[in-house]
Image (cartoon, rainbow, N blue to C red):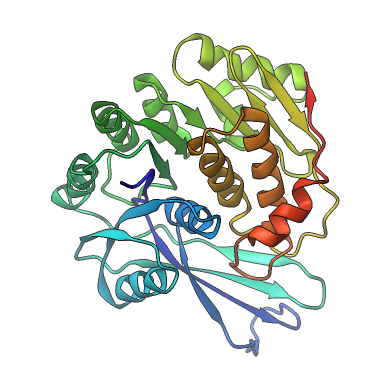
Amino acid sequence: MVDIVTLTPNPALDLSTSVEKMVPSRKLRCVAATRDPGGGGINVARVVRRFGGSVEAIYPAGGFTGQLLTSLLARERIPTRVVEVEAETREDFSVTENDTGAQYRFVLPGQTLAEPEWHAMLTTLAATVPAPRIVVGSGSLPPGVPADFYARAAAVTKRLGAKFFLDTSGEPLVEALKHGVTLIKPNLREMQGLAGRPLSSERDWVEAARQHIDRGEVEIVALSLGHLGAVLITKDVALRSPALPVTAISTVGAGDSFHGAITHALVQGRPLEDAFRLGLAAGSASLTMHGTELCRPADVERLSREVVIERL
């Protein structure tokens, strides 16, 4: 039995490198690149696996980059169910400027998926036997995939008797909330988009989250606030934690590390506050890594002792 299944409709091969200084119109000599599996749900699966959790990843893959993506996941011993597609799996890349420490991230949209291809992902999810305890949908949607894809995935998850955790934005998030999900992990910009207004205070954050909770659209809102930390909100509880004082090297995968750690803790039956603590430590640990690397359990354990949580 697999506890957690992740669904990633728009996976990527993440490439990272660095140059001394970013200068337009010149050849920039980069250091040797590193490549990692990428895409929201895939990163969540990688984090859960690092914590020793039981996880499986469902995603579409095509072409050489798709083969390489699957090969890299096999190296990390992550079970996968791959939906073969015609389009080449996209590559994203990030470049760090050594002179300033600034990181430049370039995210491609992904190739168009045909209806039978994206529908096959839902069919693959529905065929999960025995059913998982949590399904995580995460990431953007590639061209050709309808905005209600995650709403459809939530419906499949409900039929499986599992909980649905979601990390996406814009219309796909709105459509999924109409159906109802267990947890969402927006950042502040995404939450403001849902609310249709600026959210500048703790009271604003809690009120905006509880509007969706009170309507029965979601049970838990894990709101990441960047340098302001994070809040976790349910119908009865609102937890706040400031950001840990770490030196940020790369922001790639920080949100996915936060999400993956919370998911792993909750599927183990740990209290909500403990899951929030682990998520905060994981997100902070990811910030200290280079390129597209994710958090490491030893760093998460160390940083978790520094997390301060207050009830609002």
Q: Can residue 224 be seen in this view?
A: no
Q: Residue at x 39, y 59 (%)?
A: 11
In depth, the one of 55 and 176 nearer the eye is 55
Hey, which quadrant is residue 4 in on the image?
top left
Q: Left or right? Give the position of 118 relative to 285.
A: left
Screen quadrant of the C terminus? top right
Hey, which quadrant is residue 13 in on the image?
bottom left
Rendered location of residue 15, percent (x, y): 52, 73
In depth, the one of 19 and 255 nearer the eye is 255
For residue 113, above or below residue 138: below
Q: Residue at x 24, y 65 (%)?
A: 87
Rendered location of residue 195, percent (x, y): 58, 21
Rendered location of residue 247, percent (x, y): 82, 60
Q: Which residue is drawn at 86% across and 51% down?
A: 245
Rendered location of residue 18, percent (x, y): 67, 79
In depth, the one of 46 and 87 nearer the eye is 46
| Number of numbered tags placed on the structure image | 0
Q: Left or right? Give the position of 204 relative to 10.
A: right
